[in-house]
Image (cartoon, helix red, strand yellow):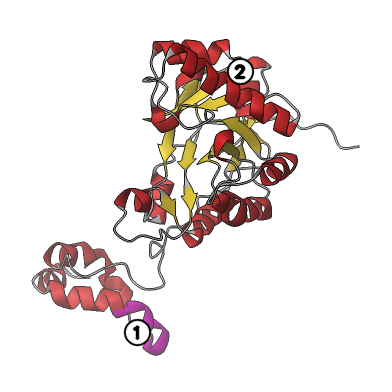
Amino acid sequence: MSGRTKQWLADRPALVALAALLAPALVSVAGFGVAALLPDVQVAARSLPHISLVPLGLPGADQAALPTPPPADVVPAGRTEIRVPIMEYHYIRVNPVARDRLGFNLSVTPADFAAQMDWLDASGFHPIDLNDLRAYYQTNLPLPSRPVVLTFDDGYADFYTAAFPVLQAHGFKAVAYIVPGFLGRPSYMNVDQVQLIDQSGIEVGAHTVHHVDLVKASPAGRKLEIEGSRSALEQMVGHAVLDFCYPSGMYDAAVIAATQQAGFQSATTEIPGTRHAWASRMTWSRVRVNGGEKLAQFAGSLDQPEPTTTASLPPPA
């Protein structure tokens, strides 16, 4: 393209924008060389911000999956700190009350949740649970490439009806933080459902007995809420429950001490972040997934994947 032609196009951004939008159709119908104009689309974008200049049918029109890493790639054991996003969900539902802004922010629609899980699968992410993350530090077991932890707070019934089937379809692990004092109430899971998800590979974690603010609780009340939640859940599922979540992310030094004394080996907060070390296991950060979040926002919140190495494969039999 000559300099004179480029200047002529630069003076006519609306024409360039229109050509960019119609280029795929024109090429397919008439073989017209409109694609040559695409380098000048940025000029038009500055003049026409209200028009989407992502050409139809070209990459970028939707959130593309990341390239899948080689299957033998792992996060090798021995690192002091690693990037593992611990995603924080609450409801998987369509918010029933339009004026309830908090409820909206806590509610990821089933359609959005399914799209997020599809994207994780297509992008080569490997959902693990907190047993796996602890084993990385405690027993030097490597993690799969692009590890991510999916956590669901409070034990809502829609976890069982809307999230659990999608997780099963993808073969994904997850962590359900259960409030045992709420089980069987309207909108919450019941004991049978908690037992079933546990038997199906979902890790059950504790979230106090009644979802109280542990910072404001008395020492006796704090002890009852923390130790009682572990005891109730262990009787329910028949094995140790070792991971805890502070209700509403509220904790202080006394709460951390009480959680450790109760025998929990990790605890999660609502502090944003994706980097985790064993030394900070009682205050691991998470990434909140908000209602109405676009898929591109969800993908961006995962941070850069932890670097991997290629594992040594056993020789063929």
Residue assigned mark 1: 26
Answer above or below: position of 131 versus 47: above
Q: Is residue 29 magenta?
A: yes
Q: Is residue 90 left or right of residue 6?
A: right
Expressed as whole percent of the image width and height from the top left, the position of residue 121 reads: 59, 51
The C terminus sits in image quarter: top right
Closer to us: 114 or 291: 291
Answer above or below: position of 110 versus 135: below
Residue assigned mark 2: 137
Q: Give the residue furthest to the bottom.
A: 30
Residue 197: tell me if it is visible. yes
Q: Which amino acid type corresponds to the residue marked 2 in the rendered image?
A: Tyr
**Looking at the image, which residue is at 59% across and 22% down?**
228
**Looking at the image, which residue is at 40% across and 89% down?**
29
Q: Which residues are magenta?
A: 22-33
Return the disc, 1 or 2, that comes first in the chain's sequence.
1
Answer above or below: position of 87 versus 232: below
Occupied quadrant, residue 122: bottom right
Mark 1 or 2: in front is 2
Q: Is residue 63 magenta?
A: no
Occupied quadrant, residue 240: top right
Expressed as whole percent of the image width and height from the top left, the position of residue 140 reads: 66, 18
Q: Which amino acid type corresponds to the residue marked 1 in the rendered image?
A: Leu
Q: Main secondary structure of the magenta part?
A: helix
Q: Please count the marks in the image.
A: 2
The circle on residue 257 is none
